[in-house]
Amino acid sequence: MVTTDDRGGRPPVSGLLTAVPSVARADGSVVRLRMLRARDRREWEALRSVNARWLSEWEATSPEPAPFRLSFRQLVRWFDKEAQGRRMLPFVITLDGVLVGQMHLFGITWGSTRSGAAGYWVSRSVAGQGIAPLALAMLCDHAFGSLGMHRIEVNIRPDNDASLRVVAKLGMRDEGIRAKYLHINGAWHDHRTFALTTEDPQAQAMVSRLTQQQHAPERRHTEAGPR
């Protein structure tokens, strides 16, 4: 049961920041979502540095030059403030305790909307290994189940094939194009919106369903003819 602490229907901060259950994968590795911490600085900066070129083509940028750049400690404090204000779930993704990416739920609104948008990235070293869809499923289960949210959307550039595969694995509904939706790497880009609401069967027990899909034995082709 989801409890609320004000007329806006927002959950208590303690509920918002409740630890998301970690998930063990078929190979025994463990994926976890948690908050970024001040002691993560060296590991975080190394991860961002090695993935800078990999991420530059896809990450949002400001159309105006930023007046200053946040230090790592300032970034951690800003994430904490946004979480305390119930406006964002700013998680990092870890694999066996090692930082490998981020998974955020941002633009959170409560009241009669109870929605948010998910954004994520993973290190090139683990891309294509099922980390991103699992982390997104973990975030959705937490948001829909523990927090009582109604809708989660993901906005993806039409040419970002890797991210399109992530939402396809989770059965998210394609709601069409948003023209010039987000500024990335110096230009405004169209995005496709994918979403789930609590009424969608795909929104139920997403981690369990995804895990079952990944563990299901592949069907063998026994019939002759083109495949």
Image: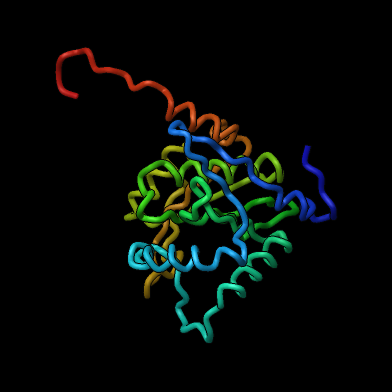
Residue in view at x 47 percent, y 76 percent: 62
Toward which corner of the image does residue 39 lie, by quadrant? bottom right
* Front one among 81 and 179: 81
Q: Residue furthest right?
A: 6
Q: Position of residue 56 (x, y in %)?
A: 37, 67
In the image, taking residue 168 as reference, residue 7 lies left or right, namely: right
Residue 80 vs 227, above or below: the answer is: below
Residue 88 vs 132, above or below: the answer is: below
Toward which corner of the image does residue 3 lie, by quadrant? top right
Residue in view at x 68 percent, y 50 percent: 114
Q: Position of residue 178 (x, y in %)?
A: 45, 58
* Front one among 24 and 197: 24
Residue in view at x 70 percent, y 52 percent: 17
> Which quarter of the rendered picture does the N terminus lie within?
top right
Residue 68 vs 226, above or below: the answer is: below
In the image, taking residue 11 as reference, residue 101 lies left or right, namely: left
* Front one among 176 and 131: 131
Toward which corner of the image does residue 121 lie, by quadrant? bottom left
Q: Residue furthest left?
A: 225
Q: Position of residue 16 (x, y in %)?
A: 72, 52
